[in-house]
Amino acid sequence: MTNTATRVYSFYRDGFKQMTVGKTLWKIIFIKLLIMFAVLKLFFFPNFLGNNFETDEQRADYVLEQLTRMPAQVN
């Protein structure tokens, strides 16, 4: 098992070392992920619980209430 894991690791390590275009593509992927998760989070996902409630207990109560409340009956 250890020999197989070592061979797989060596395979990928050597493959990444020899990449030329692939390194640039990986850099682009990481930059896009950084933009999606870091920058967009600041603008589209505000800290609702942190801004509207003072304590962790209030936040927990609000979340529990939202998760366990019954939906409105449609007639």
Image (tube, helix red, strand yellow):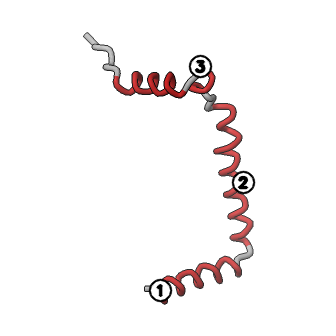
- Amino acid type of the residue that numbered disc 2 sits on in the rendered structure: Ile
Residue 6: x and y, percent? Answer: 54, 85
Residue at far left of view: 75
Q: Quadrant of residue 15?
A: bottom right
The residue identified by callout 3 is 52
Q: Quadrant of the C terminus?
A: top left
Q: Earlier in the sequence, mark 3 or mark 1?
A: 1
Where is 60 relative to 36, above or below? above
Image depth: mark 2 or mark 3 in front? 3
Kindly identify the residue that appears in the image at 70 percent across and 77 percent down: 19
What label sits on residue 65 in the rendered view?
A: none
Separation (CA) of disc 3 from disc 1: 52 Å
Residue 7: x and y, percent? Answer: 53, 87
Separation (CA) of disc 2 from disc 3: 32 Å
Separation (CA) of disc 2 from disc 1: 34 Å
Q: Which one is nearer the viewer's eye here, 46 or 57?
A: 57
Where is 30 relative to 59, above or below? below
Residue 23: x and y, percent? Answer: 72, 69
The residue identified by callout 2 is 31
Q: Would you say 62 lies left or right of 38 here? A: left
What label sits on residue 2 in the rendered view?
A: 1
Q: Would you say 65 lies left or right of 11 here? A: left
- Amino acid type of the residue that numbered disc 3 sits on in the rendered structure: Asn
Please say if the residues under marks 2 and 3 sit with CB atoms less than 8 Å apart: no
Q: Quadrant of residue 41?
A: top right
Q: Counting other residues with Cα less than 10 Å from the Cα at mark 2, is it few (<14), some (14-19), or many (20 or more)?
A: few
Kindly identify the residue that appears in the image at 69 percent across and 49 percent down: 34
Q: Secondary structure at mark 1?
A: helix
